[in-house]
Amino acid sequence: MRTHTKAQRIVVKHGHAVGVLTSEGEEFHVKQAVVASTGPDQLYLSLLANAEVSFRLLAQAKQFRYGRGCVQIHLALNEPPRWPDARFVKVGQPHLTDGLDGFTVAIAQGMSDLLPAKPTFTVDCSTNLDSTRAPAGKAVMRVQVLEVPYRPRGDAAGQIDVGDGTWTPDLTERFTERVLSIVTKHIPNIPSAVIGHAVITPDTIARYNPNSGPGDPYGGAHDLAQSYLFRPLPAQPSHRTEVPNLFMLGAATWPGHGINGGSGYKLLSHG
């Protein structure tokens, strides 16, 4: 196993995938197959840039679309979150929203490249299930805000100066304050119980994972035009690629993102 190494190119000889060339110049040969957990744009436009691939696939790979961004706020707490209703402690990832109307407005604002005035998000506290993730009596919690623009051009509430749209420390902190002000309406000891936090923004995601495009944590938009038989591409509606011995899996393939392992299971079952 090799980690912290960039795959530069998939080696194709006589029309078959036979290995992988790294950015360090090392070439690894395969016994059975190459399995790429990438987006179709990364696969066909970069890793297979020197291989013969049909024009139709290349054209569709260039048009592969990403969804909107995500902001994750990771909190270290000096005590577990105090939900007014204790049943929430047993819910894995509750959604906090004003309801369908509020959710729709927040998405529309994100689609317009505006910071949502009342963002909707999920909250999960992993120490509820595994107390060893924090010191005794302490807790960790994650707030995940979806449908956030990669580079906001404004603020729907007219309160935050977004500048040129870069997620600067100031912009990140002010948006975090907005989110936590909503959280406190549902969990009264937030943010008073917060003893530290770290925030992941869309540009953070893009910097660490090329499969996220400009900052989409789910590896590509999941609207109907890019799902089911159209995922990852209409010309490749499965995990089997056009190149023999080369297969795809991951969020860009059906059934998409998530922690269910469905993509890898389907590949092993039907590849």
Image (tube, rainbow, N blue to C red):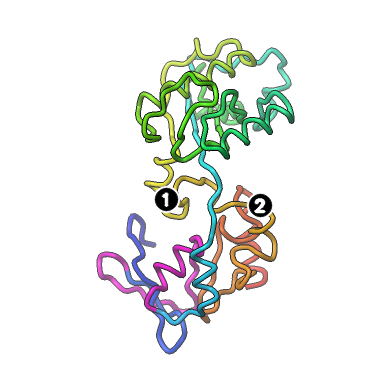
Residue denoted by label 2: 223
Point out the image quarter for the C terminus: bottom right
Q: Residue at the bottom extreme? A: 14
**In the rendering, at what x and y percent does residue 144 appear?**
55, 32
Q: Is residue 175 left or right of residue 235?
A: left
- Of 65 and 254, nearer the camera is 65
Q: Residue at x 25, y 65 (%)?
A: 24
Q: Which residues are magenta?
A: 22-50
**Is residue 42 inside the magenta stretch?**
yes
Which residue type does callout 1 highlight?
A: Asn
- Of 140 and 68, nearer the camera is 68
**In the rendering, at what x and y percent does residue 65 appear?**
54, 55
Circle 2: element type: loop
- Rendered image: mark on residue 209: 1
Q: Is residue 222 left or right of residue 199?
A: right
Crowd around label 2: few <14 · some 14–19 · many ≥20 (10 Å)? few
Which residue type does callout 2 highlight?
A: Asp
**In the rendering, at what x and y percent does residue 256 appear?**
62, 55
Circle 1: element type: loop
Q: Nearer the viewer, mark 2 or mark 1?
A: 2
Crowd around label 1: few <14 · some 14–19 · many ≥20 (10 Å)? some
Q: Residue at x 47, y 51 (%)?
A: 212
**In the rendering, at what x and y percent does residue 128 appear?**
60, 26
- Of 149 and 188, nearer the camera is 149
Task: Locate residue 198: give its quadrant.
Answer: top left
Above or below: residue 271 compared with residue 1? below
Q: Residue at the left extreme? A: 24
**Is residue 92 inside the magenta stretch?**
no
Point out the image quarter for the N terminus: bottom left
